[in-house]
Image: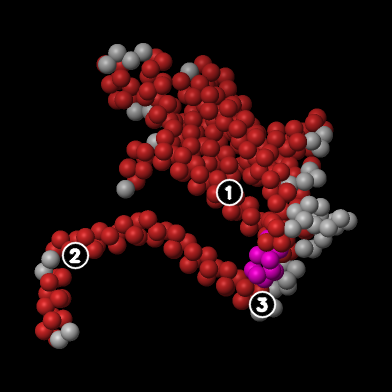
């Protein structure tokens, strides 16, 4: 192509505002859809490369900081194979993961079944709020680790004890957030609903509950983090299986690569569950997504 033709092509592109707008909009769409994922991938890649190089430099003992490659190798081996008989750590990471996830899902389900109705009831009834609020705040501020010996005494080293710790860890953020959501419902929305003849039940179902949904989901997100803490605490102090038990055993056997692998797996599980709740929020409360744009 001659110089005149190239200049003509550039002139045609720059002189077409609609084409420039379409190009700019498509770039924005690509960034909006994949930008955060790309930044996350690059960020994590740099992080693990720096970790690998720092661990290989010998400045820190491998006993305290193994190589990132050793951690991923231990994670892959633990997820795809089973420990041989007689090993200090029985089973595989996969077995312990499924065990912990099962207890976590059961505990979170019970916490939601208790916490959401309790929070809505406390927010909508001042008498229930007056009676229950001292107990909610007292138990919410109490460290769960202090209750482990008590529940071991009552329930023994059983799954019931572990699930109870998970429920107590997760239920109070759910209660408090649902409670706060009801209390902060805009009065103008309630007044408008009353003008159109809504009764008390319709106010709760069509105004208060939809307004409170983002608060409830936020409480569930906090409950997931607290529930994972409860899982690890219960399994470290009173378990013979699970990720918490695996962390304890790998520390006892000075297997730092395996311990870091389990910690990394916990981060992945937590972020995955949080992302699932975000998708749930976008589905049940799409107006929240619109407000953030």
Query: In the rendered structure, which disc, 3 or 1, sits on the residue that comes first in sequence?
Result: 3
- Residue 32: x %, y % from top left: 35, 56
* For discs 1 and 2, the disc positioned in front in the rendered view: 2
Q: Please report the residue visible at 69 percent of the width from the left and 69 percent of the height from the top.
A: 70
In this rendered view, identify the residue nearer to me: 23 or 42.
Answer: 23
- Left or right: residue 200 versus residue 222 is left
- Residue 274: x %, y % from top left: 52, 46
- Figure coloring: secondary structure
- Residue 69: x %, y % from top left: 65, 70
| Residue denoted by label 2 | 20
Q: Please report the residue visible at 70 percent of the width from the left and 35 percent of the height from the top.
A: 163
| Residue denoted by label 3 | 56
The numbered disc on residue 270 is 1
- Residue 247: x %, y % from top left: 74, 54
- Left or right: residue 136 versus residue 277 is right
Q: Please report the residue visible at 46 percent of the width from the left and 20 percent of the height from the top.
A: 124
Q: Please report the residue visible at 66 percent of the width from the left and 56 percent of the height from the top.
A: 263
């Amino acid at each position: 192509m001659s110089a005149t033709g190239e200049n003509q092509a550039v002139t045609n592109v720059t002189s077409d505002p609609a084409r420039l707008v379409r190009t700019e909009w498509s770039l924005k769409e690509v960034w909006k859809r994949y930008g955060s994922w790309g930044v996350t991938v690059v960020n994590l890649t740099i992080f693990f490369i720096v970790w690998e190089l720092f661990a290989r430099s010998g400045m820190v003992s491998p006993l305290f900081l193994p190589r990132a490659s050793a951690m991923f190798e231990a994670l892959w081996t633990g997820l795809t194979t089973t420990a041989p008989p007689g090993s200090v750590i029985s089973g595989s990471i996969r077995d312990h993961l499924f065990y912990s996830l099962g207890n976590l899902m059961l505990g979170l389900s019970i916490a939601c079944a208790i916490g959401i109705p309790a929070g809505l009831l406390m927010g909508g009834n001042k008498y229930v709020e007056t009676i229950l609020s001292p107990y909610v705040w007292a138990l919410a501020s109490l460290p769960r680790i202090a209750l482990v010996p008590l529940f071991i005494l009552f329930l023994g080293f059983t799954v019931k004890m572990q699930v109870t710790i998970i429920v107590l860890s997760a239920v109070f953020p759910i209660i408090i957030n649902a409670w706060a959501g009801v209390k902060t419902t805009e009065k103008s929305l309630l007044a408008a609903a009353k003008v159109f003849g809504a009764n008390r039940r319709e106010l709760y179902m069509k105004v208060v509950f939809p307004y409170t949904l983002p608060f409830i989901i936020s409480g569930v997100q906090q409950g997931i983090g607290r529930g994972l803490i409860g899982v690890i605490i219960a399994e470290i102090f009173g378990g013979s299986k699970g990720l918490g038990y695996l962390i304890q055993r790998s520390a006892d056997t000075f297997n730092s690569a395996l311990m870091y692998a389990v910690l990394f797996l916990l981060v992945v599980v937590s972020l995955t569950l949080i992302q699932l709740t975000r998708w749930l929020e976008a589905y049940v409360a799409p107006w929240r997504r619109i407000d953030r744009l």
